[in-house]
Image (spheres, helix red, strand yellow):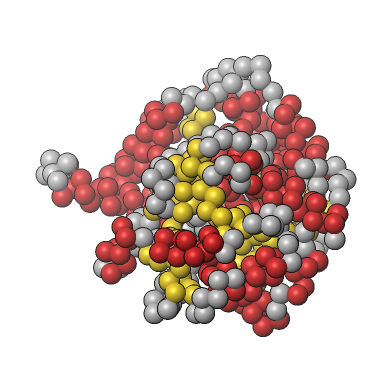
Amino acid sequence: MSGVGKGITTASLALILKSKGLVVSPFKCDPYINVDAGTMNPTEHGEVFVTEDGAETDQDLGHYERFLNINLSLANFTTTGQIYQAVIERERSLGYRGKCVEVVPHIPEEIIRRIKKAGEKYGADVVLIEIGGTVGEYQNILFLEAARILKFRQPQDVIHLHVGYLPTPESLGEMKSKPVQQSVRLLNSAGIQPDILIGRSDEPMDEKRREKLALFCNMNPDDIFTNPDVQSIYEVPLVLEQQKLSRKIFEKLGLRGGKKDLSAWKKLVDVIKSQKPELPIAVVGKYFTTGDFALEDSYVSVIEAIKHGCWSAKVSPKIVWIDSEKLEKKGAGFLKKFAGVVVPGGFGARGVEGIITAIKFARENKIPYLGLCFGMQLATVEFARNVCGLKGAQTVEIDPATPHPVIHVMSSQIKNISKKIFGGTMRLGVYPCILKEGTISRKAYARRAIFERHRHRYEFNNSYREKLESAGLVIGGTSPDGQLVELIEIKNHPFFVAVQFHPEFKSRPLYPHPLYREFVKAAQKSKIKN
């Protein structure tokens, strides 16, 4: 089923193979007709993860980057929409030389072409392909067909791993293997027999379940692995490798591994699992709920980056979701119990006044604050209103008629917005930023020039720059030409940093992002002081 853990399993397997000395290139196939993830609602699909080259991708690429500690690109991601678009464009330009272009074989062939490109780009020994969604869904069948063709053409070079769910119904208290038996049958109907089966479950799979699956799925018991729930996703590579998963993959693919190991990763997991003092952090946003359920996926990179910073400081993150719409009704007084406040990215008017209320409270009560993209824009609005006295100040995204547009649309985006050209047209990908001497941020990065990833259409309005600076706002970082404000701080505050970019995209469990690391340190001091 969707969300069972294919992305973490893929990322874990990639790390294991990398630890053995192989060059690995992960590749995510999303079954949507959307050309990319940029136009998808984050509460429906999860976070939009932006790569260095500006591709708006699925959140699983974030997991790949964090586990592998590498930067990926558009070459590592595709959707059904991209595939069809490429095939149709090639047909229109006579790329098929007058042939009748058909769903099969031309769509699977384009998928295979992209898979091979993902390997060639990085000089990879292994390409790990994750097919999103669920076995048996109509929209996945062409990706499965591509996988079948790959195996048929190169049987010695391709293996199929199936991640299936083994539930333990509370009313029964017994782990059930039937759902996995059925999903394997569905795979068989698509012409695919799993070479390796990974069972996701609450508890480790027992031998009885393993024997049942082997019998009914046409597999050897030693090709079946267990992947139970663990305290942290970063423990999964160790769980899988304890069962010698890499040895099985090497055996099936005829590969040899080097002598590298997972010792640094083991130390990280030891820190994660150790007893540590809690650090309460409030994340104030508006993409938390879907129906009656709350979920983390909308801000998964932010959450992971906070965790990275906390683990480096030997504290345990206690992250609490604050729905900004509820905050509008209740006020922000309860935020005083938190050691720090984070406002992540977002779009649209819903819940904005609640976020501004939270920012005001953090500024006035000296609570460490980290604003990300929208969190920087609304911090600017709050400062303009409540420090500079600019009544009605707002971002034009929320109020085009505001008397004080302290955040306005980027000049390069005016045409796109007027013509409703939204997909893939924001300021995307990595851009340079020059940090101001003497700022918290310059000290955190320990260098003058940085490169961070962006995803926005609106920017700081330089017409208000002098007025806001004279009132105590610090322009801590700008584009190299000094025109685009990338980072702001506030004087006489222990830590008030807001950035136009998304530093969370570059945070790694073994290498926490400098801003998140310093935010956590400031939050620690705040907790002790209060």
At x 65%, y 54%, the residue is 303
Q: Is residue 334 left or right of residue 443?
A: right
Q: Position of residue 192 (x, y in %)?
A: 48, 42
Q: Nearer the viewer, residue 133 or 75?
A: 75
Q: Is residue 261 visible?
A: yes
Pinpoint residue 463: horizontal percent, then vertical percent.
Answer: 40, 64
Q: Which quarter of the image is occupied by the N terminus?
A: bottom right
Q: Is residue 229 visible?
A: no
Examine the image and state in which quarter residue 109 appears. Answer: top left
Which residue lies at the image location 67% right of the left edge and 65% below the top edge? 363
Residue 502, position in %: x, y?
A: 53, 51
Asked whether, in this view, residue 300 is left or right of residue 155, the answer is: right
Q: Residue furthest front?
A: 470
Question: Is 128 on the left-hand or right-hand side of 509?
Answer: left
Nearer-the-camera pick, 450 or 426: 450
Is the residue 474 above or below the residue 156 in the image?
below
**The C terminus lies in quadrant:** bottom right
The answer to which quarter of the image holds residue 53 is: top left
Q: In the rendered image of this protein, does residue 163 appear above or below residue 491?
A: above
Q: Position of residue 424 (x, y in %)?
A: 36, 55
Q: Residue at x 41, y 34 (%)?
A: 118
In the image, residue 316 sits, relative to residue 375, either above or below, namely above
Numbered-mark total: 0
Q: Residue at x 47, y 58 (%)?
A: 137
Left/right placement of residue 403 relative to residue 440 reads left
